[in-house]
Image: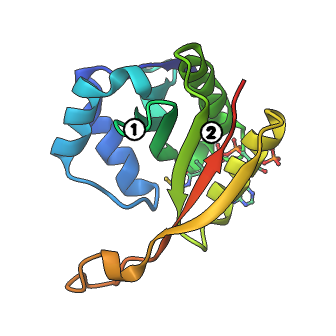
Amino acid sequence: MALEPPTLDDGRQLWALARISDLDVNSPYAYVLWCRDFAATSLVARDSTGTIRGFVTGYVRPDAPDTYFLWQVAVDPAFRGRRLARRMLDRISSCITERGIRYLEATVTPGNTASRALFASFARARSAALSWTPLFDRGHFPAELPEQHEPEDLVRIGPLR
Ligand SMILES: CC(C)(COP(=O)(O)OP(=O)(O)OC[C@H]1O[C@@H](n2cnc3c(N)ncnc32)[C@H](O)[C@@H]1OP(=O)(O)O)[C@@H](O)C(=O)NCCC(=O)NCCS
């Protein structure tokens, strides 16, 4: 599996993978835009046929240049449990620490066991501190949604070396 920054042509596949990954799916436009403007802080895992089996999207926080915010991480359901997400986090972590970034943040819903285990595993391997704090509660999201959005807890990991 080749790990590399996304290209503009990958936006479609990111959206499609988000749809089958049980993620909060953003608009197709958001993924295409991401591949244009945040490719340097994002990553895709491409198999030998060119199909994307996993991705990480993220950005350096404008108000906290020492902090990388990991927006979404997803692995194709057929490729889970093979440490692909860990490989992607390790690679993105190497890229950002080279740029002087020392903290990784993400938000996770309380019931997302796999994602919580992923960040805990990553922090442990890096011997980095990990903290969880509530960030967005239900009231931050539109009440008009057919299903109320779950709260999102902030995980902060670092300092990374
Ligand atoms: C979260 C996700 C990316 C993990 O991908 P993955 O490639 O299967 O994860 P890995 O194989 O690299 O496992 C990494 C760690 O998480 C643990 N883990 C992975 N899936 C797990 C599960 N369902 N339950 C418990 N632990 C799990 C692994 O045991 C491993 O921990 P360890 O090092 O202590 O053994 C994948 O389940 C996914 O795409 N989920 C849907 C999208 C999502 O919720 N994304 C996160 C919110 S943005």
Q: Can residue 43 be seen in this view?
A: yes
Q: Which of marks 1 and 2 is nearer the N terminus?
A: 1
Residue drawn at x 58%, y 39% as measured from the top left:
104
Residue drawn at x 42%, y 26% as measured from the top left:
41
Q: Which of 88 and 71 is in front in this view?
A: 71
Image position of 29 (left or right of 82):
left
Using the rendered view, name the quadrant where residue 91 is placed. Answer: top right
Using the rendered view, name the quadrant where residue 23 is placed. Answer: bottom left
Work out which quarter of the rendered image holds the C terminus and state it. Answer: top right
91 up-or-down from 111: above or below: above
Tell me where residue 66 appears, x and y as whole percent.
51, 31
Please tell me the numbered disc located at residue 123: none
Q: Name the residue under label 2.
A: 85
Single out the mark in the foreground, 1 or 2: 1
Q: Mark 1 points at which residue?
A: 61
Farthest residue, direction left: 29
Which residue type carries mark 2?
A: Ala
Which residue type carries mark 1?
A: Arg
Residue drawn at x 19%, y 85% as measured from the top left:
144
Q: How crowded is mark 2: few (under 14 residues within 10 Å), some or many (20 or more)?
A: many
* Local secondary structure at mark 2: helix
Farthest residue, direction top: 98
Q: Is mark 2 within 8 Å of ligand 1?
A: yes
Q: Residues within 10 Å of mark 1 (few under 14, many from 20)?
A: few
